[in-house]
Image: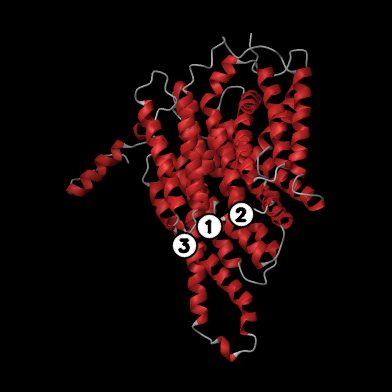
Amino acid sequence: MYRQVPFARWLPKPLSILLNFIVLFPIMTISGVYTGNAAELSGALAAYTEFVSLANNAVAIGMAMGLLIVLRVRMRFKSQEILIFCSIILASLSYMNATTDNPYIIVAGSFLIGFFKLFPMIDMITAFMVTLSPNGDRGRFYALFYPMTLCIGQLSTYIFASAISDSTYQAPYFIMGSIMLLITIISIIFQHTSRFSFKKPLYQIDWLSMVLITISTMSFNVFFTFMKQQGWFISPYMIASLFVGLLFLGLTIYRQKFIKRKLFNFSIFYKSSNLSHSVILLLFLGLYMSSSSLYTQFSTVALGHNNLVASRINLWMIPGLMIAGVYAFYSFKHKWKIKYYIITGFVCFFFHTLSLYLLIQPQIDIEYIEYAMIVKGLAMGILYIGIWFYASSNLAFEDFFSTLSILLLIRSFLGTAIGGSLLSWAGYQFQWQSLSDISNHFDSSQFQNGMDMYPGINLNALLASIKIVLGYLCWLIVPILLFVLFHHYGEFNYRRVVLFRKVLRGNSFRGYRL
């Protein structure tokens, strides 16, 4: 008989819950690239920073691919077998990423880390859901789970940045590899050996579609990551990667029409207004999340701070995330409208962007940005909870994991990749335009050592381009609010349509209730 809690019956319940925490959060934290060591990793490998971004996106792609087959894997193997095997693999991959000097191995290792971390993570999250929400209330679970995991993510980023500043970029890999081996020992001693359900084989998985969609998403990853470095569409490599991505995506969709056991159900996205609307919201979210690159440019290039200082400032997102969890808890408890809940999140992102727009200048004290980070944490927590809750509503069980896999790809990879490429292109264009405008007002021949002025001029052009991009992001709130306000969110009021039609026809609507 399978137990929802992954640990043995002889363990006291408080200890079982504690072990669940100890196992879950390191598995969620482990990655192929850590935010705190991104710059050091790029420098140590003597590689473009785009390779680090490529590897970071590969983690999300690997997790999405694992989510497609997680249910079948849980039916084939015992919970203990999954955790032991995946922990050993993750420890080995962490060691490989720490010791290699090849950026392509970093990318491949990051993809595999994302793929193998998904299986034990889902098992632990299921037990965590039973602990936080015994009656199966998804709203309560999301309100508690997402702020907790996002806070742990910010805290781990600061810890790793601190470890890197005292040693090398390899420190996070060795730390997480050691923790994975410790988790293996915990699993051997304390975990039960029951199965999730009756045993099912793995050969029924559509492995060919898995390969096709993986090639497609990794091609899109190359396209969006290297666009700026390769000169946009001038580069034949970018055109080829886009073509390969579209081709293999088309082959995947075509194949799903004729096989018995479908890996995806793409038709549900245009049949369900929940999902189609949520996809657009996730793209908007990705665009705002990509604005963190502007803050990184400002703090490291303009102010000269290192990653440790930036990570310390990001810790101020934690109070905002906690407030978002409390707000979500009471919102779902009192059944407030999800529409206005999501609007609150985007409005908070607007205020965060506006704060950065007003604060950015050459001599600012970086501590002033702490207040903006609180608002960003509030916005991110609200939208992570609200959009995911709305998207997963009314999903049939057979479509649940495949649909969430696509949504995970859009939220963690596609949205931020598209947003990052757009902001990168805009920042590049506005920076050159600012340099051109500045150069019109003086002639370097009138100054001694005129080229010595270039660093200061370039810095001013960078700050001007960042402020221009942030200004456009502020105006983006207008179409977003209109898009959210005009969607019904499953509460379409036909009575209001009748009243609106009567108003247009000039008929009386006395006696009708709005």
Tag 3: residue type? Tyr
Kindly indicate the quadrant of the structure image that contains residue 199: top right
Identify the mark nearer the N-term, 3 or 1.
1
Instruction: Judge by depth and name the residue closer to the eye, 367 or 32.
Output: 32
Residue assigned mark 1:
229
**What whole-number distance in Å separates the C-alpha atoms at marks 2 and 1?**
9 Å
Identify the mark nearer the N-term, 2 or 1.
2
Crowdedness of circle 2 by 10 Å Cα count: few (<14), some, many (20+)? some
Give the total of numbered labels. Answer: 3
User: Residue 472: which disc?
Assistant: 3
Q: Is residue 269 above or below residue 307?
A: above
Q: Secondary structure at mark 3?
A: helix
Q: Secondary structure at mark 2?
A: loop
Residue assigned mark 2:
48
Instruction: Judge by depth and name the residue closer to the eye, 55 or 149.
Output: 55
Q: Secondary structure at mark 1?
A: loop
Identify the mark nearer the N-term, 2 or 3.
2
- Foreground: disc 2 or disc 3: 2
Crowdedness of circle 1 by 10 Å Cα count: few (<14), some, many (20+)? few
> At 63% from the left edge and 12% from the top edge, which residue is drawn?
195
**What whole-number distance in Å separates the C-alpha atoms at marks 2 and 3?**
28 Å
Q: Quadrant of the N terminus?
A: top right
Instruction: Judge by depth and name the residue closer to the eye, 128 or 31.
Output: 31
- Foreground: disc 3 or disc 1: 1
- Are the residues flagged by discs 2 and 1 in contact, CB closer than 8 Å? yes
